Image (tube, grey):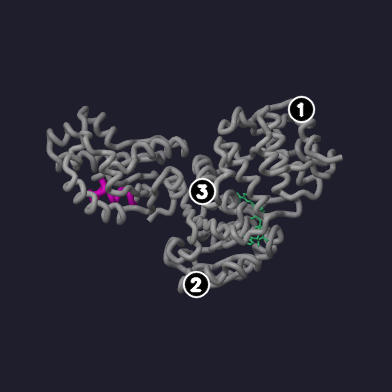
Amino acid sequence: MANHALDRHLALIGFMGAGKTTLGAEVAERLGRTFIDLDRELEAQQRRTISELFAHGGEAHFRVLEAAAAVDALSKAPPAVVALGGGAAESATVRKALRDNAMTVRLEVDFDTAWERVQGGDRPLAADRDQFRALFERRKTLYEAAADATARDVEEVVLAAGGAVVESGSLEQLGVLIPGEGPVALVSDPRVQGIYGADAQMALGSRLASTHELPAGEQAKTVAEAERLWNELRLDRRGTVAALGGGCTVDTAGFVAATYLRGVDWVAIPTSLVGQVDAALGGKTAVNLPEGKNLVGAFHWPARTVVDPAALATLPETERRAGMAEVFKTGLLAGERIWELPDLELVRRCAAYKLAICLRDPLEQGPREVLNLGHTFAHALEAAGPVTHGEAVALGLLAALRLSELDTGDVEETLAPRPVRVDRERAWTALQRDKKARDGTIRLVLLEAPGKPVTGVELRDDDVRRELDRLIAN
Ligand SMILES: NC(=O)c1ccc[n+]([C@@H]2O[C@H](COP(=O)([O-])OP(=O)(O)OC[C@H]3O[C@@H](n4cnc5c(N)ncnc54)[C@H](O)[C@@H]3O)[C@@H](O)[C@H]2O)c1
């Protein structure tokens, strides 16, 4: 079974009318992949419509052509989004090609919706409602068996492609959601362990091999803590590290998994808002050095990310505010007022947005740069005095909006950023040293409009300095 579509095709299967063509095109756009709609490919190849192919050679002949086209598309690089015709999964050869080369997502649709969408059209197998129902029932089982995941909308397809499940109550499903059958080492901090540890352990059942504790917060992200964890682990290569907690637990345990035995699987189970909308997504793991944050790390995509937004109910307000800054950033990048949504939908949208970008750019070589919106200023402020990351990001977004000449009303109302007391000169020096500064020019991520980020914007030092100064209290 495939856990994600990072390095393989994303195949969409499902009944006629499930929306494979429409959703497939949208998902491909978000992942920056080619979209292959196999029915259309086949029509182009054969120069006949599907109905004509059915009429001409009969269904059996059509299935042969369909299977050949599917196997051909699934055996080619680079990874694409491939929508299969409703009957393609009937072929054992196609099912094997799916297993070998794709992450297969079944698009769910109920019978009435499917019939509503296709009746009266020219699909050969959708002429009679009773026959359509019989086929619907028969294929349902087939799709379920062939699929690695199930989705109902674009967000769910993207989440599945990234290996993520976002559902209230998913924490209690850990036992089935953690891929594989090997032993699991559960890592968390004392607070999270106290609130969710027992539920997680129960859900893991006999797969739970050991439990481990990291200190809460940044104290977890040290080489010494990573070393302690390396020494405690008794996993073999089939084992999985499960990181339950905030971004610090996830970053450290993920890094330990990336390096232990040259890399074992890991599962991220973020419980803070920062973790659920940001830290646990995209495969970056790291610990800090005295010289700076996140200086030692690895790209190691989690085998699964289990996000239970219900866990946010116990999150302290200050931690929630830190996460809201990242939510707001995502809303600006996506051009949607995500920050106004209820928790489940808010987390789902943010997680899907970040995963789509990271699937496009898993090693941070390009498109992922947009995620730095507001962060160049934020890192400069954090380097110059006591300020929380959430406060710093809120101020950074304010500066980015001002420099983009966009309205700042929403950020002021939602995040209420207030100038902070930090050392101006240190902040300016840090900003110039920021990793985005190249050839003496500061390169920023700004917005042409909400939903339209622009990277590599070079501005005059005076303009950047003026905006930085406005974020600092006298
Ligand atoms: N790897 C990445 O791509 C990435 C992205 C963003 C941030 N990060 C990292 O994430 C870290 C920050 O993560 P964070 O903000 O989650 O901080 P954190 O991990 O310190 O968690 C914040 C606090 O909230 C507590 N907590 C977590 N979930 C809880 C819950 N459901 N109920 C009650 N308490 C809960 C934790 O015990 C902790 O005390 C930083 O080190 C940052 O570098 C990494």
- Residue 84 position, x and y percent, is 30, 42
> What's the magenta bit mostly, secondary-structure-wise?
helix
Q: Residue at x 48, y 60 (%)?
A: 170
Give 240 or 159, whichever is nearer the viewer. Answer: 159
SS at mark 2?
helix
* Mark closer to the chain start, 2 or 3: 2
Real-space Cα separation, disc 2 to disc 1, in angstroms: 56 Å
- Neighbor class of circle 3 (other Cα within 10 Å; few <14, some 14-19, many 20+) is some
Q: Residue 125 carries which label?
A: none
Q: Mark 3 points at which residue?
A: 345
Ligand 1: quadrant of the figure: bottom right
- Quarter placement of the C terminus: top right
* Mark closer to the chain start, 1 or 3: 3
Tell me if the residue at label 1 has its CB under 8 Å from ligand 1.
Answer: no
Q: Do the residues labelled 2 and 1 touch (CB within 8 Å)?
A: no
Q: Name the residue under label 1.
A: 463
Real-space Cα separation, disc 1 to disc 3, in angstroms: 37 Å
* Mark closer to the chain start, 2 or 1: 2
Membership of 91 in magenta stretch: yes
In the rendered image, the residue lying farthest to the right is 474
Q: Which three-letter amino acid code belongs to the residue tagged 2? A: Met
Tell me if the residue at label 3 has its CB under 8 Å from ligand 1.
Answer: no
Q: Which mark is residue 202?
A: 2
Q: In which quarter of the image is residue 425?
A: top right
Q: In which quarter of the image is residue 71?
A: top left
SS at mark 1?
helix
SS at mark 3?
helix
Q: Which three-letter amino acid code belongs to the residue tagged 1? A: Asp
Task: Inspect this view and state whether residue 223 appears.
Answer: no
- In the image, the segment drawn in magenta is 88-99
Membership of 433 in magenta stretch: no
- Residue 120 position, x and y percent, is 21, 35
